[in-house]
Amino acid sequence: MELSERKKKILKTIIDDYISTAMPVGSKTIAEHMGMSISSATIRNEMNELESMGYLDQPHTSAGRIPSDKAFRMYVDSLMEMAQLTPPEMNFACDYYDERMVQTESVLRAAASAISEATDYVSVVMAPRLNRVTVRHIQLVPITSTSALVVLVTDVGIVRDTPVSFNSPITADQLDDVSKNLNKIFAGRVLSADDLDIHREIMQELQGQREIFTQVTEILRDHLLSADSSFTVGGTARLLNHPEYDDVDKARSMLSLLDSNRQISSVINSDDGMEFKITIGSENQNEQFKDCSVVTATYKVGDRSEGTIGVIGPVRMKYDKVIQVLSYMKDSLAEVLGSSGKRIDNNVKENDHEQEG
Amino acid sequence: MELSERKKKILKTIIDDYISTAMPVGSKTIAEHMGMSISSATIRNEMNELESMGYLDQPHTSAGRIPSDKAFRMYVDSLMEMAQLTPPEMNFACDYYDERMVQTESVLRAAASAISEATDYVSVVMAPRLNRVTVRHIQLVPITSTSALVVLVTDVGIVRDTPVSFNSPITADQLDDVSKNLNKIFAGRVLSADDLDIHREIMQELQGQREIFTQVTEILRDHLLSADSSFTVGGTARLLNHPEYDDVDKARSMLSLLDSNRQISSVINSDDGMEFKITIGSENQNEQFKDCSVVTATYKVGDRSEGTIGVIGPVRMKYDKVIQVLSYMKDSLAEVLGSSGKRIDNNVKENDHEQEG
DNA sequence: GTTAGCACTCAAAGCCCTTGAGTGCTAACC
DNA sequence: GGTTAGCACTCAAGGGCTTTGAGTGCTAAC
């Protein structure tokens, strides 16, 4: 059933008020906020209907009304007004990046801090999934005589380190040889599970390096198949800035929930590549987050690799602000993580030709 | 003035009780805990004297006594009994390390989690300072045509990545050459500020690579001079497990304090290489931590590189348990971070000879 | 359909009293 | 002289009671 315009306006006023005060909203307050064009008695009648329709809850008889999850759903779907961030506000992220951040992990941490700072909610930033990206460079760096660091650089500028260890000692020169061979095979190739199988045949031609090759292939496979890729959680302390967590027990259980990676990834993982995804309270599959809302956005690095950023907060969330910030941050992340990749696009192609010819 | 044995025993009983209950301790409770060998009235007399000597505080007339910072100082200095961790307890750290942790940062994060889990306090783990360690390997890995990753591996097995960017484009082959030259010069050398100046002369002989050499030298310098090295804070959520932070305002201010790296390093940085350092409440220079105690321990990686681990908690802290855990963790860290280095000691020497001959 | 008026509800806050843990003091005891 | 029992005193915490006031639903009039 469609709501009348007036009901919508009242509902929006209630939600706006509740979002900013966290207190049940009474009919008189609404009348004032709506410019006294209608009396509080009329609003009471309307609220009564809104309550029976499931949009409002009443904590107790003599309290005002609280918007239900259903009301928030309608709010974000159609009532909410979106504004753009003003230019000064858009600088919030700049303070967090510094010139040394080539490694993905530091960028992600910086992004998490920036999002938390800007929204005052807990932020989650997932690393970009290495899907259909091109390997630009692979280098094995010796750590000990039987272990090395596999440094993987993609065309979108993402750097990943992974250690490997070997059964028998290997010298630095040997590793260098292996690196060269690895580059011949993988550089310029698209990372996908199928490709790795094809290259496995090539490996068999190589004498004595098969063990290492297999291991490196496994690492690449891990990286590109890691659906539950690593993520960074920021600003957990900000939980206490919201009256929902004035109760220490609630705060404690929420904080320890946020300490558990498994719990968080169950809430964040959105396979569908929607630009924004808003999950409100009871809509969360995970029972423990039923008092929370989760807003996530998908960012792209170089048109192929995708990652997720998001915010976890109370249902009474400043959805408009959060979406603005996430919207700005996903572009910002795409730029910071992807810029290096774009800059060398030509260069990569040249290398491809050299290696393929 | 020296305390009588009985006063010491009473004081110890009070502190032990207060540590476990967080409640003011009354004379009757103490009499029970001491086996009723003396009456509560006698204990009251003794407590009265202890209070006038500054070892006890009384929140209000009709409450029990609370040990002062001075009392805790005496407690950790002479009253406290130290027990060893039982073998099952010593396994707590093992669950946190996994075989892939060659990179220092992941090890430190794991250590922070382990310490927090074992002590139920907030933990701080500082990266080992690269002081007087030997460079085992330097590798430049191309990221873009004008930037690269400097991967530094030391003889104690510590790996550090730092990005550099160049003014003019450089090919992968050129970077490989530079890496080889860097290794010729630095591999096997001790990292110290003086040495870097000496090597600067050598660099001048090298044509065309001077810019890169200068930058890498600067990075090495940064790493070895970084007194305020990076650190990891873990288990901040555990703050709320202690009644000291039942007040949300206190919890909030403490949590945001722990979010500030600058504040934490002001409390943790201990230049003196003491094995353990305990700072109790008002002994903290930083006014904001005057209600906290900080226990730090110094761990060594390969007999040269030193790092710091520590715990931040309420003054009413289980100092014995904390010291046990830190003691175990510093050995554990030394082992995990240093094992790879030891394993290849011979190998390193061989390389040295090759490169020096 | 809207509004004013009124009776009703109920959490929150203030107040008072009781309770009980704990103290200090004193006088008796060993 | 140190130790102890006894007793008066203190005061935070908690229970119960009342007041307050924000907010509602209903009804009758506009």
Image: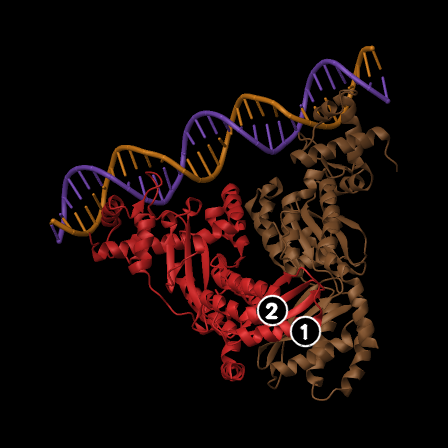
Chain colours: A brown, B red, C purple, D orange
- Which chain letter goes with mark 1? A
User: Residue flagged by tag 2: what amino acid is it?
Assistant: Val
The residue depicted at 74 percent of the width and 57 percent of the height is A338
In the rendering, which numbered label is found on residue A139?
A: 1
Q: Nearer the viewer, residue A245 or B155?
A: B155
User: Residue flagged by tag 1: what amino acid is it?
Assistant: Gln
- Which chain letter goes with mark 2? B
The residue depicted at 58 percent of the width and 63 percent of the height is B215
In the displayed structure, would residue A326 be above or below residue A208? above
Q: Which residue is mark 2?
A: B151
The x and y percentages for residue B221 are 51, 63
Residue B289 horizontal side relative to residue A260, left or right = left
The residue depicted at 55 percent of the width and 46 percent of the height is A248
Residue B25 horizontal side relative to residue A168, left or right = left
The answer to whether mark 2 and mark 1 are in CB contact below 8 A is yes
The quarter of the displayed image where residue B81 is located: bottom left
The secondary element bearing badge 1 is classed as strand
The residue depicted at 71 percent of the width and 39 percent of the height is A87
Few, some or many residues within 10 Å of mark 1 (<14, 14–19, 20+): many
Residue D29 horizontal side relative to residue B178, left or right = right
The quarter of the displayed image where residue A153 is located: bottom right
The x and y percentages for residue B38 are 23, 54
Q: Pick the quarter of the image with the C terminus of chain A.
A: bottom right
The secondary element bearing badge 2 is classed as strand
Q: Nearer the viewer, residue A67 or B129?
A: B129
In the displayed structure, would residue A86 be above or below residue B310? above
The quarter of the displayed image where residue D21 is located: top right
Separation of residues labelled 2 and 1 (CA atoms): 10 Å
The x and y percentages for residue A309 are 71, 53
Q: Pick the quarter of the image with the N terminus of chain A.
A: top right
The answer to whether residue A161 of the structure is visible from this angle is: yes
